[in-house]
Structures are given as C-alpha cells and as structure tokens.
Amino acid sequence: MIKIGTALFEACEELERERGISKEVLIASLCDAMVAAYKRHMHVKEAANIEAILDEQTGEIGVFSTKVVVKEVEDPDMQISLEEAQEIDDEVEVDDEVKIEVTPDQFGRIAAQSAKQVITQRIRDAERNNILNEFLEKKGTLTTGIIQRVENRNVIVNIGKTDAIMPQKEQIPREYYKPGNRIRVFVLNVKETNRLPQVIVSHAHAEIVRELFELEVPEIEDGIVEIKSISREAGFRTKIAVWSNDPEVDSVGACIGPRGSRIQTIVGELKNEKIDIVRWSPDPVEYIVNAISPARVVSVDIMTDDEETKDALVVVPDDQLSLAIGREGQNVRLAHRLTGWKIDIKCVSQMENEESARVSNYEYTEDSDEERTVDSDEIAEEIAEEMNQQAYDEEDVQAEELEDDSAEEVEE
C-alpha cells in the first residue's frame, strides 16, 4: 500500500466546494490512474481483475488483483490455489474470490505522475459536463451576466461558471456594451466542444420580453393572463398580444399596471424600447384590428378562406395610412409577425379610386364590345347588298344586249 495521507481528501473537498466536482469522481479518477500506471509498469494490456482500492481511514492506496480460489490452478493470473488463499484468509473456500495486493515496489513516483495526468483530465471532463448540464437546463431561459469585453464584434458575457458569446446579430443596434455592466440575456444555445461548452446568448430575442413580463406581472405568472404572441424589432418596437382567462381581469390593464408602473419598469429594462400591448382575439378580423393599433381601422376583408394562405386587406382613413404602415413599414411588419396574417393596407381614397377605375373600365369595355358587334353586322349586310346589286346589274346588262341582238336580226 502507498501512504498518501489526508491532504488528498482535503483537496478533493475543496474542489467539490469551488467547482462542484464531487469527491467520489476524484477518488475514482485516482483509482483509475493507479490501474493505468500498473498496466504500463507491468507491460500488461488486459487485466480485468486489477483494481485500485483507497482506504480513507488510513489514507493508503494499493493495487489489488482479484483471483478465484480453485483446487488446481490452470491460469495463475486469474486463479489461486486453496492452500495459498487460506494463508490470506482462513475462511475462504473453493470458488470464492480473494483480493491479493500486487502493488509494485517503488511504485509511488510512477503512480503519482500517472495520477496527475489522469486526475487533471478527469477534472476538466467533469467541469465541462457540469457546465454543459447546467446550461442545457438554462437553455431557453433568462439569466444575468457581466460584460467582460468585446472581441471581433462579439460581446463576451460572464454568466457564472463560464463566459458566453453574444454574436452581433443578437445585439441591440446602436447599444453600447460597456465592460463591467450587468446585463440580462437569453440563453439561446449551448454547443459542446472539446474544451468548455460554448454558450450563445442573445440580448435581442423576443423571449426576453416574455420573461420580463412574467417577472413583473403576477397575473401572467399565475396563469390568469396568457401571452399569446410576441413580435419584436430589438431596440425599436415590440408588439405583444395578451389574453385573459378570467373575464373579470383585463389583460391589457394587468400588463400596464397601476399608473403604468409595470410597463415602465419593463421599458426601462429594455432601454426605452416602445411596447404595444394588444388584446388577442380568436376572431382574426378583431385580432388584426388590435394588432394595427394605434392606427384606426375602417374595415378588414379576409381575402381567402384557405387556412394556410392568410391574406387580409385593411382599409384605414387617409390620415391614418402612414401611422398604420409605420416608419419603413415597421408597424405593419410587426402586426404581420404577431398575427401570422399577410396584411395589405390601403386608405379610403385609394379604395375609392380603384373602385371608380374598375367601374369605368368595365363600362368602357362593355360599350366597346357592343359597338364592335354592330359594326361587324352592318358591314356584312352592306357587302351582301353590294354583291346582290352587282349581280342584278350584270343580269340587266346581259338582258339589254340580248334584246339589241334580237332587234338587229329582225331588221335584217
């Protein structure tokens, strides 16, 4: 046996407290290292009956070979005679197993080198697995971190046991990320690598808004008010559709809070990003009207009954057209994402002009067709009359010629 003392156990307990690596994992790693060192030292590739045993009370560790007690030994590596086994333990019988210490002399230095390599690798593996499991559970949730630095347009955020990466596309445009500031991020993905797991976080994801509302609005956390849909253009504007499962609770009012306290807290967390809270409805017409707010709507026409092709025509007053469309189409774009409907917006004057043009075009086309038909019939009749008149004229000429010939013959 090799005396290792109690320092190892103290180190294991410290690692367990600091890095969350259990003491049992470290002890198992040490035993595996001892077995690997023994095989290398004894030039043995296969030794299934070799194991290392650590005695925590005495602080000693040794390598043991498990052998089966037999009457006649056929394989010395796997078997031991009854007489030899009884020298170790008087009560053993045939077919019992006994453990025989096979720790080589001067094995401490070799075992220490091997143990150092194996334990270091096992610590890294255990640390990686702990982080991977922890953040796999956090995937799809909100967490708080501290901005460390900016590298190649990526923001590095420390979120506890590891540093996460916030790519440029997951950042809010025009926002300055200062190292040392605390930031609330959404755990987007966790990728397993050869080293520590790579955690991808987002500061622009729509689910951040959902998490903030769940934190600030008790009715949402209790399930009384339900968030049906969210569409967001980070840093500019967000639309959120809510629905109350209790007729006595106003879903929009619950999200706004007394004197706007709840929504103001969320807007402040999102750096004054504009938030539109709309009431969800199972009726698509009503839902689209709510989603287009704050613009007033004159009418909504569902263009098709096909559930897969969702097209709607929204008519608004002339002075509301720019508000309904929004700056660079932002309002109608967010309404489309919120409702899932393709929305075409027109003002009243546009609809009137299109209707007038359509009616005029219909009347003109109808008149043109009638004139074209009358003209064709008249031309055909005229041609027929001319042909008949020409035939009559030819017959009259021929008759006159015959009468003249007959008269000449009579005179002769």
Image (spheres, rainbow, N blue to C red):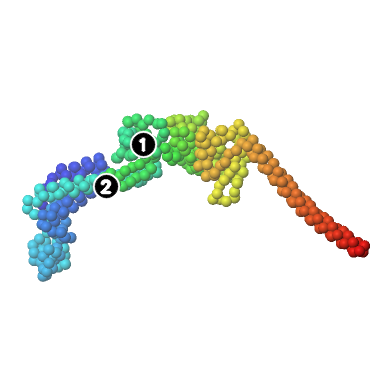
Q: Is residue 288 left or right of residue 167?
A: right
Give the residue at x 56% y 37%: 292
Quadrant that contains the C terminus: bottom right
The residue tagged 2 is 194
Name which residue type carries label 2: Asn
Q: Residues within 10 Å of mark 2 (few under 14, many from 20)?
A: few
Is residue 246 visible in the rendered image? The answer is no
* Gap between marks 2 and 1 measured at Cα: 26 Å
Describe the element under mark 1 as helix, strand or loop: strand
- Closer-to-camera residue (381/269): 381
Q: Residues within 10 Å of mark 1 (few under 14, many from 20)?
A: some
The residue lying furthest to the bottom in this view is 72
Is residue 333 visible in the rendered image? The answer is yes
The residue tagged 1 is 144
User: Residue 1 appears at what percent x and percent y?
Assistant: 10, 52
Give the residue at x 58% y 39%: 345
Give the residue at x 11% y 65%: 76
User: Residue 160 appears at what percent x and percent y?
Assistant: 31, 38
Q: Nearer the viewer, mark 2 or mark 1?
A: 2
User: Residue 309 appears at what percent x and percent y?
Assistant: 55, 49
Q: Is residue 184 above or below residue 369?
A: above
Q: Is residue 232 above or below residue 4?
A: above
Name which residue type carries label 1: Thr
- Closer-to-camera residue (65/234): 234
Q: Is residue 177 left or right of residue 397?
A: left
User: Residue 48 appears at what percent x and percent y?
Assistant: 18, 60
Q: Where, by quadrant of the figure, is residue 312 drawn?
A: top right
